[in-house]
Each structure stands twice: as structure tokens, then as C-alpha cells.
Image (spheres, rainbow, N blue to C red):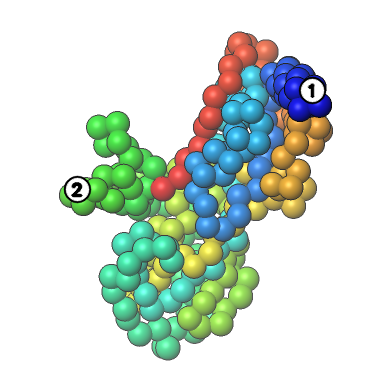
Amino acid sequence: MAEKVHGKLGHVLANTAAAKLFSLSGLFAVYKPKGPTSANVLNQLKEKLLAVVGIGKGTKMLSNILAGSKKYMAIGELGKATDTLDATGKVTEEKPYDQITKEDLERVLKKFTGDIMQVPPLYSALKRDGQRLSSLMKKGEAVEAKPARPVTVYSLSLQNFQPPLFTLDVECGGGFYVRSLVSDIGKELSSCANVQELTRTKQGPFTLEEHALHEDKWTIDEIAQSLEHCMSLLAVEPSLKKLKTEHSEESTVNCEDK
């Protein structure tokens, strides 16, 4: 009898949590640790939250948020190029880097600031015939590089230089790939480079330090509080405010990953 009562209680609590979750609407930021992909993190979040991660009309605002300004802290490694342009890939080339000075690096960074042209990585979420380029690459299919496209770098600075490693602070617009930036910097220095670590520190009005929800806080109540905080930031942006009132509620998942 005790087990039966416990089971009914658990079912009631689950239904209550689900009802509360479905009543929420908006956007909130989630912390993605190094290692798992964005899709992995979202799957974990869905399991935690009764398989629902899209929060109503907030999903309609994702394209605006993702297209906005974003900041990264990137650690690059000189002297090695990989097929994915980061540390997860296979080394495809090695070149000397001892001749590169801090001054050389700072000088080169000026060439990658402002409105520039950039070729996206082959291993990316961009698609060909409805399939991600990264998925096609993993299947062993031949993939041609996408043509260079215009992107914007609002600011780019060198934070640390301890060869072969260098740390960059980058603020850029939508469609920008830090992996391509680091690779291009290596080539500009007559060497090569790949990304060792990459952390997004800001997306639109959301910052990693103030707004990103860590896994130990993936509860209904914590998410409700995060939604309230994050949506208050969006209310001051006219385009997003208009979007909030125009679109109907919908639950979905949105992520971009290689």
C-alpha cells in the first residue's frame, strides 16, 4: 500500500511540475561545459524537465538573440592545424611558431577587426541538401568549403601569450566562427593554429557570469526565476518586445553545434 501511495504522490508531483513548466514562457541562458555538444546538453535538460525545453513564445525570439552580438574567450594553439580547426580534430599540419612574437600577434589581430570576409569551417552546423556539413564529413563524404561571407568583429584583443598558446577576447556578430578566426590568424603569421578552448561569455544581453544556468540549478523554480530575470532584459529591446506580442506560444528545441 505504501508503494502504491508513493507512486501516486510521485505522479501528482510530476504533473504539477509539468503544469508549471508549460505555464512558463520566454528565454533563459544555460551553461554548457567543455566536452558535450549543445545537443547533448539540451537532451540532458529535456530529461530533467520532463522532456520539455522550449519555453513558449521565447523560442520565437531565438533567431534574433542568436543573430545579435556575442563574446567569446578563446585559447588558440600555434603550430598545429586540425581538420575540425579545434582540439577535437585530427592534426593535419604542423609548422614552426618560435619566431612569432606578442607584437606580431597583436599586429595581425588588427586585420581581423571590423567588417571582414570569412570562410566557415567544413565541420560546422551549416547544411548541404538538408544535412549538416559535419555529419557529411563524419560519413566520409567529400565536402566543398562554403564561399567566404561577410562577418563583423566588433572587438578583438590579446589577453595572454604563452607560446604556443594565446588567449583572445572576441566580440562578433552572427554567423561568425571563432575556429575560422584562429585558423586564419595562424596562416597570417606564416604558421597554423587551432582552438584549444572556447567559452561563450555573452550572447545578446545574456552574460555567462550573470545569467547562464548551471546544471545543478536545472529545476522548475530556478528556471522560472531565470526566465523572469532574462525576459526583463529583453523587454527593453523594441524588436524583441514586438516579437513577444506577435507570435503564438510554441515548445521546441533550438541549438547550433558542429
Residue beneath label 2, please? 141
| Residue drawn at (29%, 74%) of the image | 93
In the rendered image, the vertical position of residue 189 relative to residue 147, given as above or below: below
Quick one: quadrant of the N terminus? top right
Question: Is residue 5 shown to the viewer in this render?
Answer: yes
- Tell me which corner region of the image, top left, top right, bottom left or bottom right, holds residue 161: bottom right
The kind of residue on which mark 1 rests is: Met
Count neighbours of disc 2 (C-alpha within 10 A) and say few if under 14, some if 14 to 19, many if 20 or more: few
| Residue drawn at (37%, 47%) of the image | 124
Along the viewing direction, whichever of 111 and 192 lies nearer the viewer: 192
Residue beneath label 1, please? 1
Where residue 213 appears, as percent x and y from the top left, is 72, 44
Of tags 2 and 1, the one toward the viewer is: 1
Q: Is residue 150 left or right of residue 163?
A: left
Residue contact at pointers 2 and 1, CB within 8 angstroms: no
The kind of residue on which mark 2 rests is: Glu
Tag 2 secondary structure: loop
In the rendered image, the vertical position of residue 231 relative to residue 154, given as above or below: above
Residue furthest toward the left? 142
Where residue 251 appears, as percent x and y from the top left, is 58, 21
Tag 1 secondary structure: loop
| Residue drawn at (27%, 37%) of the image | 128
Along the viewing direction, whichever of 127 and 104 lies nearer the viewer: 127
Where residue 137 appears, as percent x and y from the top left, is 26, 50
